[in-house]
Amino acid sequence: MRKVLFGLVLIALIVLSLFVGVHSVSLRGVLVGDELQRLLLVKTRIPRTISLVLAGGMLSLSGKIMQHLMQNKFVSAGTIGMTDSARLGILFVMLFIPNGSILTRSLVAFIFSYLGVLLFLSLSRVLPKGDPMILPLTGVMFGNIIGSLATFLAYQNQLVQNLSSWLQGNFATVMAGSYELIYITIPVFFLLYLLGYQITVAGLGEEHATNLGLNYQKLQWIVFALVALGSSSVLIMVGSIPFLGVVVPNLVSLYYGDHLKNTVGLTVVSGSIFLLICDILARIIIAPYEIPVSVVVGVIGGILFLFILTRRKRT
């Protein structure tokens, strides 16, 4: 029943997203053949809404899987250095391949983000166990070091503004012909779903998973490669979205349990719903102007994160 309810909410928000914005687009206008409204719908609103659904689902699923594999509720692409590593990759392209295509930027961002994850995984093995906050705090510091390096190089080469504008989470610039790379997330969703059983077993810990015949390290490399690919494609297309990969999986976990196989679909749909709501708010709060969705997600996500911390402390 809850899956049906979540699905209906998602459909309602998708429809709302198609018709809310600075320029008026109505179903009646599209049906009677208003060329401007039809053009806006096809060229901007539909690509934007698809990007919101895929980006929200991908970031939420990535966070859920990383939390499950690393047995820590507070890790995500933004707290283990993956996003900052991808940012360094984008800067690398700006410096050395300035005329590189969007595919080139995506490939380099993926390589850097994956290398960053592998480096952090190696670092996590020597961290003390027991305190769940040590891993994400170390990840934040690790990411800050990489981010500071990227910022320093950007200042040195007068690319700070370019890098900042490129990475600020914003769906206002999504248009037909320039957003299609985000469809990479669809096969990533499919592959991660197929690996659901192995990921569930790996969540028991390396020792238990190995005893059950699973090649734990190989699975980690494959899964984190898929997560890095999906997350870097979102970063390239729409920029950085804070808190999403932590907040949504934790909320789903609080109310529907930790079983990965049973909550994968809910996590994906919940991430899409959350990002759609934030984007719609970003369009209407100071209409006819628009706030970057990363700002709205940051405010709402920060409040929800504090709520999650207090709830988990009580339990």
Image (cartoon, helix red, strand yellow):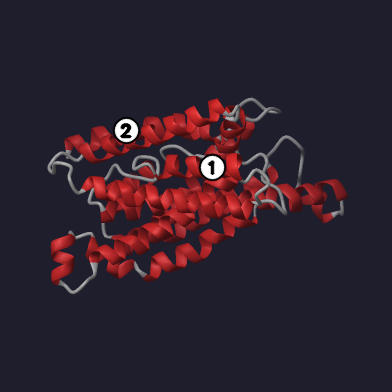
Considering only order in the chain, which callout, 2 or 1, is on the residue closer to the N terminus? Answer: 1
Q: Quadrant of the N terminus?
A: bottom left
Image-based side of 128 in relation to 185, left or right: left
Tell me the residue that label 2 is attached to. 141
Q: Residue at x 60, y 37 (%)?
A: 166
Q: Quadrant of residue 107?
A: bottom right
| In front: label 1 or label 2 | 1
What element does badge 2 sit on?
Answer: helix
Q: Quadrant of the C terminus?
A: top left
* In the depicted structure, whether residue 214 falls above or below residue 126: below
In the image, 164 versus 203, the foreground residue is 164
Farthest residue in the bottom direction? 213
**Left or right of 104 on screen, residue 309:** left
> Mark 2 belongs to which amino acid?
Met
Q: Residue at 51%, 43% (x, y): give it.
A: 275
Residue 213, percent from left and from top: 18, 74
